[in-house]
Image (cartoon, rainbow, N blue to C red):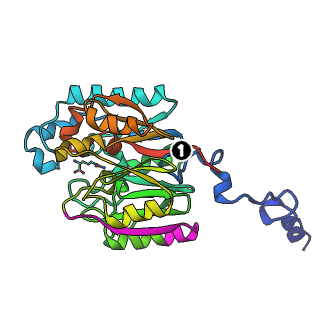
Amino acid sequence: MSDRKGLFNTSAYGGPGWSGRERTHREEIGDLWAPSGIDTEWAPLKSVLMHRPGAELDISHNDPDAVQMLAPVDLGLARAQHDAIAEAYRANGVEVHYVDPPATPSPNQMFCADLFVMTPEGAILARPASTVRAGEERLVARRLADIGVPILRTLRGDALFEGADLMWLDPESVMIGLGQRTNAEAAMQIDDLMADMEIETIPVDMPFGCMHFMGLLRIIDKDLAVCWWRRTPHATVRTLEERGYKVIWLPEGPDLELNRAMNIVTLGPRKILMCAGYDAVQKVYEDAGVECVTVDCSELVKAAGAMGCLTGVIQREAVA
Ligand SMILES: NC(=O)NCCC[C@H](N)C(=O)O
């Protein structure tokens, strides 16, 4: 009897010395968990996840189309351009983490934006839509866990989701583009999670034949978005306007060029990182008061993406 009393008096059994966990999960982010999370697309960028391309790109020389690329990619040039993007981030106060796979990954691993998306409380892991990219999310999960970023949700069943299809409109709402790479089942599963955090999920249909929602909407400041005439869904533009955004439109031009010129990353309010060489579009941005930092992506774009796709955003500054 006296033994049992002794046991109850120990901290392991809730006795004196027990220290209960009182902070919420969100309150623990920043020390117990790594600083991470976003709830806007425009607040100052703090940290990103990238994959420095390696030998996996050589496969693009056999049949680029078989690995969802547009042309063979030269590894040396691609790496140099990728390093220059990372350098531009560092020069602008952004910490760059690398996926750093233990073995040669699949060819598109470098497109980290597609492989997860952040919420204020952790990541949602993608479930890429093609067999070519299936499983890339595992390497991202491994690295996020190493860094200390919570993974809130992996998708199940027949959900298909790529991170570049989700956009934060404001801290209370996200818009998900439904199309080839993200389906309604994924939107429902994401909505479940978002609803728990009192965040509204707005699904919107994308035009047939586009790759990601990221290619139809970029947000550069709390009141400034870039859209593409006759491409960006009507509902998206109306929703932005209702929320007080001014929309700037891409100028007329060849699809591929506009696509690349729009593949930007917002470094902070009205400041972006964009591919060099798209002067007409850069002028549209600058005329709207946007500062443009440029990096040459001419080799990387042969893999069918640019810095927006290459950059998995881990953290933006919190805006109260
Ligand atoms: N967010 C993006 O636009 N990502 C580009 C992904 C390109 C890659 N070759 C793919 O087809 O998935």
Picture coordinates of residue 135, whole percent (x, y): 30, 55
Q: Nearer the viewer, residue 302 or 72?
A: 302
User: Which residue bears the numbered disc 1?
Assistant: 43
Q: Which residue corresponds to the image point at 75% horizontal and 60% vertical from the top-left?
A: 22
Residue 176 visible in the picture = no
Q: Nearer the viewer, residue 118 or 104?
A: 118
Helix, strand, or loop for circle 1? loop
Q: Which residue corresponds to the image point at 25% horizontal and 41% vertical from the top-left?
A: 260
Picture coordinates of residue 250, whole percent (x, y): 29, 46
Q: Nearer the viewer, residue 256 or 309?
A: 256
How many numbered discs? 1
Q: Is residue 61 left or right of residue 78?
A: left
Quadrant, the N terminus: bottom right
Which quadrant of the structure image shows residue 101?
top left
Q: Is residue 145 left or right of residue 303?
A: right
| Residue most extreme to the front | 287
What segment carries the magenta color? 192-208
Q: Is residue 143 magenta?
A: no
Q: Which residue corresponds to the image point at 28% horizontal and 64% vertical from the top-left?
A: 206
Q: Is residue 195 magenta?
A: yes
Give the answer, above or below, for where 243 lies relative to 272.
below
